[in-house]
Each structure stands twice: as C-alpha cells, then as structure tokens.
Image: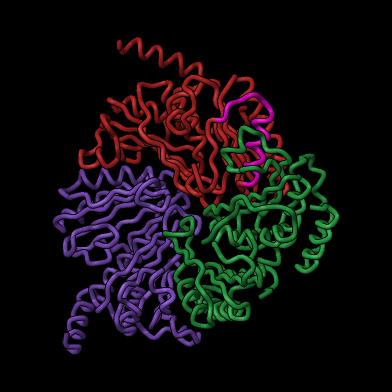
Chain colours: A purple, B red, C green
Amino acid sequence: MDTALLEKVMGQVSEELGIKKPQETTKTSIGVTEFVGTAMGDTIGLVIASVDPLLTETMGLGEFKSIGIIGGRIGAGPQIMAVDDAIKATNTEIITVELPRDTKGGAGHGSLIYIGAHDVSDARRAVEIALEAVPKYFGDVYSNDAGHLEFQYTARASYCLESVFNTPLGKSFGMVCAGPAAIGTVLADTAVKSANVEVVSYASPKAGTSYSNEVILTFSGDSGAVRQAVRAAREVGIKLLGTLGDEPKSSTTPYI
Amino acid sequence: MDTALLEKVMGQVSEELGIKKPQETTKTSIGVTEFVGTAMGDTIGLVIASVDPLLTETMGLGEFKSIGIIGGRIGAGPQIMAVDDAIKATNTEIITVELPRDTKGGAGHGSLIYIGAHDVSDARRAVEIALEAVPKYFGDVYSNDAGHLEFQYTARASYCLESVFNTPLGKSFGMVCAGPAAIGTVLADTAVKSANVEVVSYASPKAGTSYSNEVILTFSGDSGAVRQAVRAAREVGIKLLGTLGDEPKSSTTPYI
Amino acid sequence: MDTALLEKVMGQVSEELGIKKPQETTKTSIGVTEFVGTAMGDTIGLVIASVDPLLTETMGLGEFKSIGIIGGRIGAGPQIMAVDDAIKATNTEIITVELPRDTKGGAGHGSLIYIGAHDVSDARRAVEIALEAVPKYFGDVYSNDAGHLEFQYTARASYCLESVFNTPLGKSFGMVCAGPAAIGTVLADTAVKSANVEVVSYASPKAGTSYSNEVILTFSGDSGAVRQAVRAAREVGIKLLGTLGDEPKSSTTPYI
C-alpha cells in the first residue's frame, strides 16, 4: 500500500477520533530507547524494534518482530479502548491482551497489551495514540473507598475490542462493570432491560475475569441503544456504589 | 405447601438462629428497587425481581427468575455462613457462590452469592437475614497488619455450606483459615489433631482458592468435636499471626 | 549416611553460602512448638514434626511426615532462592512451592513452600537457614509506588529452583521480573540480548503466574553471562519503573 496514502488515511482517522499528536514528553531523555511515555493508571507505553528471536515464539508474536506495549497497574478497560483507537489509526495489529488481577488493592484488573507492527515507527505511533487516549477512557470510571464502576462505549468497535470480547467489528459496543461484583449483576440486568441490545459477553469472578471482584457485561447493537443501555446502568451504579461509601467520582471527565 | 405454615416454620427457624427482623435502613430511599441494604466488609445485598431472559442462561439461574444477591469486597466465609442461615430460614435455594481474589489488598477472598427464589419477597427476606447475620460471622475473623485468621462453626450445615464445601447437610461444620497461608497449614494440622473430626476440604493457594494467600481446612463430625477443633486452632493461630505484627483482633465479637 | 559426616558437609556448604547459625530469636517463647521464626516480607517459618495422617495425602507430602514451611505475604522469589540455599545445606527435599496472588496490594506474589524431611530437626534447620537468607534475596527487589522489579542470580541452582522453574540443576540461574508486566517484557528482551543465555521460562499474567501483573524471565548458562544478563536488565528496569514514580529503591542491599 502506498505510504503517503496510508499516512493520509491514518491522519483522517486520528482527526475523527479527536486524537492530537502527542506532545514531546519531558521523560524521553531517560536513555532507554524502548520508552515511549506514561499515562494515568500507572500505565506505561513501550516499543521493542526487534524482539529477540529467543522470545518471539514464547511470547506468541507470530509474524511480528516490532511490538508496541501498553500496560498498567490500574484498569484494563481504558487501556483496551485506547488501544482500539490506536489500532484503527495506525498500520498495526493486536497480538494479545492479558488481564492481571491488579488495580493496586482495588477490585479489578491491570493490563498488558501487545501491538504488532512490521515497522517500529508504526508500533511507536500506536503506543503514542493509546497513551494519549487513556485519560478519556478513564472518564466513565467512577470510584470510592468501597469499589469502582466502569462504563465504556464506542460507535464502532475495532480489532482490539473484537480480540478481547469477540464483539462484532465496526458495530457499536458497550460495557458496564462494577466491583464489588454484586453491583455489576444489577447493572448488567439494568442495561439489557433499558434498550434493545445484544449480549456479547458476561464475566464474573469465576469466569471471564482473572478472579477480579467484578461482573462485566458487554453488548452490541444500534449505537443509540447501546449508549442508552450504558447510561441507564451508569445512573443505577452510581447510586448503588454510593451506599457503601462516598459518592463515586469520575477519574477524569465522563465522555458517554 | 401451605403459606401460613411455611411462614410459621420460617419464623421458628429465624428465632432459633437469633435472627431479628432487620430494622428499616435509612438507605432505602436511594431510588433503586433492587437495593436491600449493606453490611460490614463492603457487603451489599440486592434483589432482582425478574432477571432479564437475555441473562438467565449466562448467569446459570436455572428455573429461578427472582434472585437475591449478597456480595462483598472483604470476606467470603462470613457471607457464606450468613447466607447458609438465610437459606435455612426462607423459601429460597442457593444458586452459585463465587470467590473473587480480593479483601482490598488483604490475603483472602471477596464474595458473590446468588440466591434463587420463585417470589422476589422470599429473595428479599433471605438477603435481609443474611445482611443481618454478617457481623456475627465476622466475630471470629481476626486480623493485624500482616494478615488474618478466620474460624467458622455451625452445629447444622445447610445448603450454602454444602454447595461451597460439599460438607454433609445437617451435620456440624467447622472451618479454620489463615493468611499468610503458612499459618493456615499449622492450623489445619492443629485442628485435626485436637479432636475426632472428618476432613471435608483442604484448600491452598494453588487449589480450592482463587489464588488467595490462605490455607483453609473444613471438617465435619460431632458438634462438640468440631467446636473443640476450631477453638484449638484459634488459640494457636492468634499466637502465630501475632509474631508478624500486633495481637490479632476480632472484627466484631467472637461467637465460637 | 553417617550423621557426623553429613553434619560436616552441611556445615561446609553453609559456610560457603555465607549462612551463619541463626541467633536465638526473642519470639521462641510464644508457646507454639511449630514456630521457628520470621523474616521480612511478612514471612513466617514453621515446622510440623509429624503431620496428621488425615492431611498427608491431601497435602501431597508423599513419604515425608516432618515438614518445614516457609511462607510470606510479599515475595516469592526471595523465599524460593532462600529455600534453594536451605535445601543445598540440609538433609531435606522440596515438596511444593505455591504462588498466591498477593504482595499486599502490590503487583506480585506471596509464597507457600513445603520442605520435606525425615527428621524434624532437619526441617527446622532448613527453615532457619531460609529465614536467615531471605533478606539477602530481597536485595535486588526494587520498588516505588508504581510497582517493583526483581532480580535473582545464583551460580548453582539447586532443587527448589529446579522444582519451580525446571532450570538445570547445578548450573547458573538468573531471573528478571517487573510489575507492571509491560516493563518486564522489555527486561526479558534486554536480558537475552545482553549475553549468551538460554531461556528457561517465560511467565506473564495469563500463563505461569497466578494472574500477577508481572512478566518474569528465567534463564541459564555460563555464570558470567547469566550475571551480565541480569545486570543489564536491572539497569534498564530501574530507569523504566522510575518513569512511573520515584527512583526504585532496593529493599535491603543489592547482591548481584
């Protein structure tokens, strides 16, 4: 494919997603070529231009030797959404998404995401885009001392969301999640009752999570319906988690 | 079965268990019909009158459409014991008990328990009874900065304990548990040496737990023997955990 | 085997390892015969002279009735290395090593290690040696608010390391590890690129760990090469983890 054309297409998609070119970070002088940057949730972005052949098979990298890495202590959803945007906007592919049981004592997951590229500059660009998008997707993560709520929404799911949840490519995608898990059960029920959506996945501590204290429902459908389902669950979730502590607060700015 | 008779039987069992009708909670006005109440351990009690058909199969609800939900961040044992009482005292059944790896940075589990009922008022009553019983069963949970000890005992195990541990129905049941797990190993040995009990289950980080840092032994037998085994382990456990920090303190009031 | 000779050999190995006889601990008067001592990482050392027959099969003790137990809330690597020394220096064998998901809200594991012996005095001696060695092996554990780095090295792997990682007995062994896991991926690549080593194992949140937020690479080879690989990764790791917080600090004193 023509590189100039590719660049142009990527640029348009980036603009559409509201993703600006990341500013120079003050941390680029740490003297480690793999380092790209950091984001909230103790998230770090890295690249390896050419993974050592001793590791490519073990790490399941397939045909790729250049990889981008996004991983954090707190949060899997925001990083997954951010990488979904990054894959849309760059010439890269998703390799794996792993979900450690983490959140630094919280109820949820951390994340480890490998992005494959044939050229390290593509991997780096994808990591930059993902790091920049992470704060947006923490916007509908609400928390208090007792736990957290997470809501995600996109009008058009791409390869990272397909890889993790098996949601239909290019269709609207929604997620409702809460920890303690008991609240998540009610949110799941609220979401599917609020609008005409199709269930994509249901996860609970014993299946589909890494033993996190969460119930997570994902769904697809008409984008208006998906958004409505997410919003209805969000309203109930904030009230329910609030009974166990202070009013849950957004980590940044709600976007849904 | 005659409803009036059923009510009477339930009432007698409730009285026997020392369970009072829960007081009105000040939180019933949050405007979410599913909300029942809260208890220690960041435990929340909820009901869903009629789970959406899109979810009943995924959630493994079987014949039940009304469910009660008890889940918390801290503790699985106290909530399991409390639900065992609730199942005894109401016209409900246990559906599933899931054990997230949680305790908010502690060594143990959180909990997510689904109770099935054909009528939501039964589910609600079960959740109310369970919430009220939770503090009692935190009575023999002891902790300090280094970890925790948990001891449980009942003269007559019911369906929730049978479901989780496969302990004989209607017989006495005891549990000894500690985190860090190393202490639990000694407690398990101490318990079985202290009285003539039969081992029901043994769990350690790699099997029978959700990778919690605990060894958990459960046993059955003559109620006097079971209680003696639990008490002997408790005495040793408080000394051992105390070598890693302050003297372990009960979370409420010891009951065994 | 002649006991006096055995004692002498053990003594020499102990000296070679730089292990002194543990001092009397002030805590031996807690009145629990199983208690041996404590070490950092909320680590406790225990012995059971004769495990109750009701438990030996469930616990997988095989032919052993005397066991030593080392377990902690924080750290698996330091305790594994310490027990590896202890097995070398005593007439004991490794039974099992279990890795709970712990570190008290951190990104890694806790530990539960069973050591088998035919005589409880051997088990006790092994536990004493292990407890004494734990601080040394926390020397290359570095941490800040965002996570941790761990590096281990020995010129001669023994039975505990073989049991956990399947590394060749008697050969040099190295380990590099970081949480958040993303940093560990770069450390793994850095290590294998820095020297001619053979990969022994690669673990990530979804495989080879208990869902910890770590990537862990172990390797074998010429002892100079192994040490060089570990040191190269350590240099990079300290810089990378430092981008997420303060400069990572050693838990005790670096030894590699």
Q: Is residue B122 left or right of residue C133?
A: left
State the residue in front, A230 or A124. Answer: A124
Residue B252 appears in the rendering: no
Is A89 covered by the magenta stretch? Answer: no
**How many numbered circles are shown?**
0
Quarter of the image where one finds residue B163: top left
State the residue in front, A149 or A252. Answer: A149
Q: Is residue C75 left or right of residue A94?
A: right
Q: Residue visible at 24% across and 79% down?
A: A91
- The secondary structure that most of the magenta stretch takes on is helix
Quarter of the image where one finds residue A4: bottom left
Residue C203: where, in percent of width, then height?
47, 64
Q: Residue visible at 41% across and 53% down?
A: A210
Magenta residues, start to end:
B182-199
Residue A226 appears in the rendering: yes
Q: Which quadrant is the C terminus of chain B positioned in?
A: top right
Residue B158: where, in percent of width, then height?
46, 24
Is B195 above or below relative to A103? above
Residue C240: where, in percent of width, then height?
50, 77
Is A169 above or below relative to B207? below
Q: Is residue C237 left or right of residue B38?
A: right
Residue C198: where, in percent of width, then height?
51, 74
State the residue in front, A161 or A183. Answer: A161
Is C204 above or below relative to A8? above
Q: Residue visible at 33% across and 52% down?
A: A177
Is C141 above or below relative to B254? below
State the residue in front, B221 or B253. Answer: B221
Instruction: Determine the residue located farthest toward the bottom in the rendered image.
Output: A4
